[in-house]
Each structure stands twice: as structure tokens, then as C-alpha cells.
């Protein structure tokens, strides 16, 4: 006798509603722009730019050197209210929030 399972019932996504980060410094929207810039809008409505050009072209870029590939840079997305790219690259949204609230831009070097 074969046991049948209903895989739809076993999915965790059907049991637990998705988590939506609500902290004001969490990011609600991100858009890649030319020149290794990102436009950011936070949960509280604050918005501004992140300029990554100097960082990605720096000899100190470390893991962010991979973002010199503009195709990869444009693959930016949000995960849990943070800016991320493939290969586990991400930026801290709280530091970004502080700089953008004060200056309208966060320049990474």
C-alpha cells in the first residue's frame, strides 16, 4: 500500500506568513543606477543614494570587487530589508540609513 502525502500541506510558506521587516531603517525599495550607484527608499519614506564607485574600483574592495561587473551590480535585490547581491554580498541597512538621513547620500570608499 502506498502512502500519499499532500505536498501543498507540508509547505512552510503556507503555514507561516512571510516576515516583512518593519524597522524604519530597513529598506523598502532599491534600484541600481549607472555609475555604481543605488537609489534607496527606507520603510519610513526616507530616500537617497549609495555611491559605490570608489569602493568597487579600490584595491581595498575585497569581496565587493566582484561588483565591478555591471551585470552583477544590476542584480541587486532586497532580502529581509537589506540590499543584497548573489554570492552573499550585502550592505548594512542601519549604517546606510544614518548616512542618508544626514547627508542624502552614502559614499563608500
Image: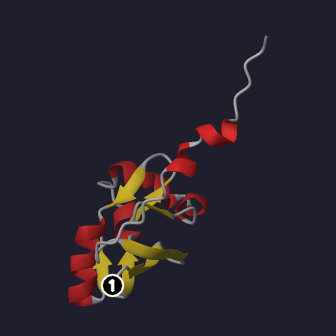
Tell me the crowding category of disc 1: few under 14, some 14 to 19, or many 20 or more residues within 10 angstroms, Cα based: few
Instruction: Return the x and y of residue 16 as percentages of the image width and height.
Output: 48, 51
For residue 109, say whether it is visible: no
Q: In which quarter of the image is residue 44?
A: bottom left
| Residue position marked by numbered label 1 in the rendering | 44
Asked whether 55 or 87 is in front, the reply is 87
Q: Which residue is drawn at 52% across and 49% down?
A: 15
Q: Which element type, helix, strand or loop, lies under badge 1?
A: loop
Q: Quadrant of residue 104?
A: bottom left
Quarter of the image that includes the C terminus: bottom left
- Is residue 59 depicted above or below 31 in this figure? above
- Is residue 21 depicted above or below 66 in this figure? below
For residue 11, say whether it is visible: yes
Q: Would residue 4 appear left or right of 95 to someone viewing this image?
A: right
Instruction: Return the x and y of residue 41 as percentages of the image width and height.
Output: 41, 82
Q: Residue at x 43, y 75 (%)?
A: 28
Instruction: Return the x and y of residue 107 as percentages of the image width and height.
Output: 30, 76
Q: Would residue 88 appear left or right of 92 to someone viewing this image?
A: right
Q: In which quarter of the image is residue 46?
A: bottom left
Q: What coloring was used for the rendering?
A: secondary structure
Instruction: Return the x and y of residue 90 as percentages of the image width and height.
Output: 38, 57
Quarter of the image that includes the N terminus: top right
Q: Which residue is drawn at 29% across and 63% down?
A: 92
Q: Which residue is drawn at 43% across and 47% down?
A: 88
Residue projecting furthest to the top: 1
- Is residue 89 depicted above or below 8 in this figure? below
Amino acid at each position: 500500500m502506498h502512502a500519499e502525502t499532500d505536498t501543498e500541506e507540508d509547505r512552510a510558506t503556507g503555514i507561516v506568513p512571510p516576515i516583512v521587516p518593519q524597522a524604519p531603517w530597513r529598506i523598502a525599495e532599491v534600484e541600481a543606477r549607472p555609475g555604481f550607484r543605488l537609489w534607496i527608499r527606507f520603510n519610513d519614506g526616507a530616500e537617497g543614494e549609495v555611491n559605490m564607485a570608489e569602493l568597487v574600483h579600490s584595491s581595498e574592495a575585497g569581496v565587493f570587487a566582484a561588483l565591478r561587473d555591471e551585470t552583477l551590480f544590476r542584480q541587486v535585490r532586497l532580502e529581509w530589508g537589506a540590499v543584497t547581491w548573489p554570492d552573499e554580498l550585502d550592505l548594512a541597512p542601519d549604517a546606510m540609513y544614518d548616512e542618508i538621513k544626514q547627508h542624502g547620500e552614502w559614499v563608500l570608499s
